[in-house]
Each structure stands twice: as structure tokens, then as C-alpha cells.
Image: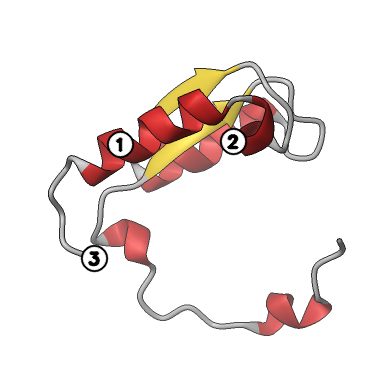
Amino acid sequence: MPWGVDALGGTVTHPAWRAKPSFCLVATDDHVIPPPAQRTMAERTGATSAETSGSHAVYVSKPAEVAGLVRKAASTGTPA
């Protein structure tokens, strides 16, 4: 489903990644967001990263890996 062009006009004044831990699962077979771009974004935000083979819909193809990273993020104990 295409995203709305209105999303380009939004303003973020306090990005959460500056104050809260970030996590990234790089899908190495993604043909929508190239893995090098995923790695760059993760590095820029200081994210804890993991990698797995999988497509852009990695949550469908690799649910165990996604759940593992979610568990790791949840165990950081950082309040929402």
C-alpha cells in the first residue's frame, strides 16, 4: 500500500531516538530499503543492530528473529 505524500510535510521536534534506546533489524535481502541504507540509519541513531536474511517484510519471513530483538529491546528496562 502506498504511503501518503502528506507524511513528507510532518515536523518532528523531539525525535525519540535521541533520548531513548533504538533497535534495528537489518533485513539483508530487502529490495525496498537497501541493507547499506538500513545500516547507515541504525548507526546514525546509535541503534543496537542485528542482521538476518529476509525481505522487507522480515516480520513475516523471520518472526523469531524479530521477536528476539523485541525481547531484547523490552529487557532494557527503559520507560516508554
Real-space Cα distance between discs 3 and 1? 15 Å
Question: Mark 2 against mark 1, which lies toward the viewer?
Answer: 1
Residue at the top extreme?
53
Q: Which residue is mark 3?
A: 80
Instruction: Classify the position of the C terminus by image quarter.
Output: bottom left
Amino acid under disc 3: Ala
SS of the residue under disc 3: loop
Q: Position of residue 40 (x, y in %)?
A: 54, 35
Query: Residue at image x 34%, y 65%?
Result: 16
Q: Which residue is mark 2?
A: 38
Real-space Cα distance between discs 2 and 1? 20 Å
The image quarter containing residue 53 is top right
Amino acid under disc 1: Arg
Q: Earlier in the sequence, mark 2 or mark 1?
A: 2
Query: Residue at image x 74%, y 28%?
Result: 55
How packed mark 3 is, by other alpha carbons closer than 10 Å (few <14, some 14-19, many 20 or more), is few
Q: Earlier in the sequence, mark 2 or mark 3?
A: 2
Q: Position of residue 62 (x, y in %)?
A: 60, 25
Q: Which residue is mark 1?
A: 71
Amino acid under disc 2: Gln
SS of the residue under disc 2: helix
